[in-house]
Amino acid sequence: MRVMILVKANKESEAGVMPGKELLAAMGNFNEELLRAGVLLAADGLQRSAKGARVRFSGSKRTVVDGPFTEARELVAGFWIWEVKTMEEAIEWVKRCPNPHEGDSEIEIRQVFDASDFDPEYMAELIERRERLAAELVAAGRPVPEHLQKKS
């Protein structure tokens, strides 16, 4: 199963305060451990919300709201995507993670939808679309993103 690990923002990360060298080194070591275990699929930190935007949908109307956004505890400062066997395994990995902020921090774990979560007929249509789009990209001489590549 794939899970997304969401590191919640705090006042400092929203103010643009970068992590110290010690925390960066500890996170680097943790990421290496995840890689060696075959768990880590992707990871990155996110710029503060002042550099972001939100698009609100109301029927066919779209409204753009520029950052910064209030309520830092509701914002995400970084993420990982992991491949684990169970939610319990993901929880155990998160418990081993260095504290991402000085003081209190929160990390949320969310399971990513898998093809088996959807109707098989609908999935066949999505797979066909994915293959068609990948072929178009190849014909145009463009790279095919990993999520569009056939899984063995």
Image (spheres, rainbow, N blue to C red):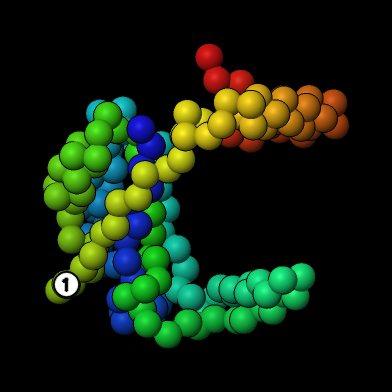
On screen, residue 19 versus residue 89, left or right, reads right
Q: Measuring from the top left, give residue 16's x and y in whole percent.
A: 40, 77
The three-letter code of the residue at mark 1 reads Asp
Q: Name the residue: 39% across, 66% down.
A: 76
The residue wearing badge 1 is 104
Q: Quadrant of residue 62?
A: bottom right
Q: Measuring from the top left, give residue 65's x and y in whole percent.
A: 62, 81
Callout 1 secondary element: loop
Q: Quadrant of residue 105?
A: bottom left
Q: Around disc 1, counting alpha carbons within 10 Å, would you say few (fewer than 14), some (14 to 19), or many (20 or more)?
A: few
The furthest residue to the top: 152
The furthest residue to the right: 140
On screen, residue 36 versus residue 92, left or right, reads right
Looking at the rendered structure, the number of numbered marks drawn on it comes to 1
Q: Measuring from the top left, give residue 81's x and y in whole percent.
A: 39, 43
Q: Quadrant of residue 33?
A: top left
Above/below status of 48 relative to 150: below
Q: Name the residue: 35% across, 57% down.
A: 6
